[in-house]
């Protein structure tokens, strides 16, 4: 079973913020496939469904971002999900807005949600989709920036990025080799 995890913070005040872009992709996929996050267990909202013939778990941790591993690790253990079936989507300050990077493995790169997952599952050898949100302008702190909502103009770009990222997830679900998915979906979204 594939496990698709979008990272974000729970609550209305965090909706459409840079830090919640992982949730936005999961929400898009859920709506597109006429699903609901109808289960809650292990500090996560999730569903398990068949998508294109594949059994898939879509997950949004109910912890705050920095504790995401407290939701992901127990779900993986309970459902016997293999590391190579895990795909995590999250915001990345080091990529310009509109850029998407798929990776097979890697460090947390300073992202606290990823640090938590790596710590709790004991490895960084899992797939991820890094979604560029850019860096704050001079004088704005990183926490203020990532918790800021996208402007209307930015959302025009980010809507395309969300759809692009969702298509990458669907390609992974269809059992395509992740290298092929990376080759097709890495880069700037137009």
Image: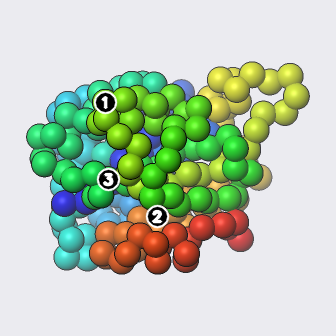
Residue at left offset 41%, top offset 70%: 178
Q: Which quarter of the rendering shows the C terminus?
A: bottom right
Q: Which of 62 and 134 is in front in this view?
A: 134
- Label 1: element kind: helix
Residue at left offset 58%, top offset 38%: 109
Q: Quadrant of residue 87?
A: bottom left
Residue at left offset 39%, top offset 35%: 118
Whether residue 121 appears in this view of the structure is yes
N-terminal label among 2 and 3: 3
The residue beneath circle 1 is: 120
Query: What separation in Å lies between label 2 and label 3 (alpha carbons)?
Result: 15 Å
Q: In which quarter of the image is residue 176?
A: bottom left
Q: Categorize mark 2 by other alpha carbons within 10 Å: few (<14), some (14-19), many (20+).
A: many
Q: Which mark is residue 42?
A: none
The residue beneath circle 2 is: 166
N-terminal label among 3 and 1: 3
Q: Decide: marks 2, 1 in contact (CB < 8 A)?
A: no
Q: Nearer the viewer, residue 132 or 14?
A: 132
Query: What separation in Å lies between label 3 and label 1 (alpha carbons)?
Result: 14 Å
The residue beneath circle 3 is: 86
Residue 123 location, x and y as percent? 35, 40
Residue 3 location, x and y as percent? 28, 54
Q: In which quarter of the image is residue 93?
A: top right
- Position of residue 184 relative to residue 169, above or below, is below
């Amino acid at each position: 079973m594939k496990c698709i995890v979008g990272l974000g913070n729970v609550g209305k005040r965090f909706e459409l913020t840079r830090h919640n872009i992982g949730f936005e992709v999961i929400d898009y996929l859920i709506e597109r496939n006429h699903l609901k996050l109808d289960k809650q267990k292990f500090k996560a909202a999730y569903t398990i469904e068949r998508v294109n013939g594949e059994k898939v778990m879509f997950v949004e941790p109910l912890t705050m971002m920095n504790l995401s591993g407290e939701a992901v690790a127990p779900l993986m253990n309970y459902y016997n999900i293999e590391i190579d079936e895990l795909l995590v989507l999250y915001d990345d300050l080091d990529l310009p807005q509109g850029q998407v990077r798929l990776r097979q493995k890697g460090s947390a790169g300073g992202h606290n949600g990823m640090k938590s997952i790596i710590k709790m599952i004991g490895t960084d050898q899992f797939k991820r989709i890094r979604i560029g949100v850019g860096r704050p302008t001079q004088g704005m702190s990183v926490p203020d920036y990532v918790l800021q909502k996208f402007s209307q103009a930015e959302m025009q770009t980010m809507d395309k990025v969300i759809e692009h990222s969702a298509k990458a997830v669907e390609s992974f679900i269809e059992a395509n080799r992740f290298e092929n998915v990376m080759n097709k979906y890495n880069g700037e979204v137009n």
